[in-house]
Amino acid sequence: MPLIRVEMTEGKSKEYKKTVLDCIHDSLLDTLNIEDWDRFQRIIEIKKDDFEKPKGKSDDFMIIEVTMFKGRSKDQKRALIEGITAMLNKRLQIAPTDVFIVIHEPPDENWGLAGKQRG
């Protein structure tokens, strides 16, 4: 049950944003073997003046946070990062240097599912 949060500057089309989410979901399917229905994703659009980024980054720059259960290997995480980046480049021509990904793995006791604590 990965939770996805994408932060990007506002102004992209509905189709562009849907493709971003599809790229991430397809990479999760390919690398972590999640179920297809498992789509907990959101895009947060930020005004350009409110989104500070390193020099040299384009208007396509985005921060992708993946929050998921512990237990994936280092190789799976590497494949996920590389897969997301490659799909965004292939489908939307987003430069790999404009993709910043961080993976969070909170302990099981920090997850609440259907009113129940996991773990």
Image: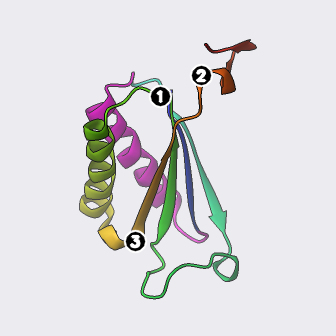
Left or right, 50 with respect to 80, comes to right
Which residue was labeled with disc 2?
Answer: 108
Residue 21: image x %, image y %?
Answer: 45, 47
Identify the residue at horizontal 66%, vertical 21% (top origin).
Answer: 109
Magenta stretch contains residue 25 = yes
Magenta span of residues: 9-35
Q: Is residue 36 above or below residue 94?
A: above
Image quarter (top left, top right, bottom left or bottom right) of the C terminus: top right
Q: CA distance from mark 2 to mark 1?
A: 8 Å
Q: Position of residue 83 (x, y in %)?
A: 27, 48
Q: Secondary structure at mark 1?
A: loop
Residue placed at 32% from the left, 41% from the top? 27
User: Is disc 3 placed on a helix, strand or loop?
Assistant: helix
The residue that mark 1 highlights is 70
Report the amino acid beneath label 1.
Lys
Packing grade of label 2 (10 A; few <14, some 14-19, many >=20) is few
Residue 99 lies in the magenta-colored region: no
The tag on residue 43 is: none
Three-letter code for the amino acid on which mark 3 is drawn = Asp
Residue sitting at x 29%, y 46%:
78
Q: Nearer the viewer, residue 6 or 100?
A: 100
User: Residues at badges 3 and 2 in contact (C-beta under 8 Å)?
Assistant: no
- Of badges 1 and 3, the one in the foreground is 1
Q: Secondary structure at mark 2?
A: helix
Callout 3 environment at 10 Å: few (<14), some (14 to 19), or many (20+)?
Answer: many
User: At 40% from the left edge and 71% from the top edge, which residue is drawn?
Assistant: 98
Q: Nearer the observer, disc 3 or disc 2?
A: 2
**Is residue 62 placed above or below 34 in the rendered structure?**
below
Determine whether label 2 and label 1 are within 8 Å by CB: yes
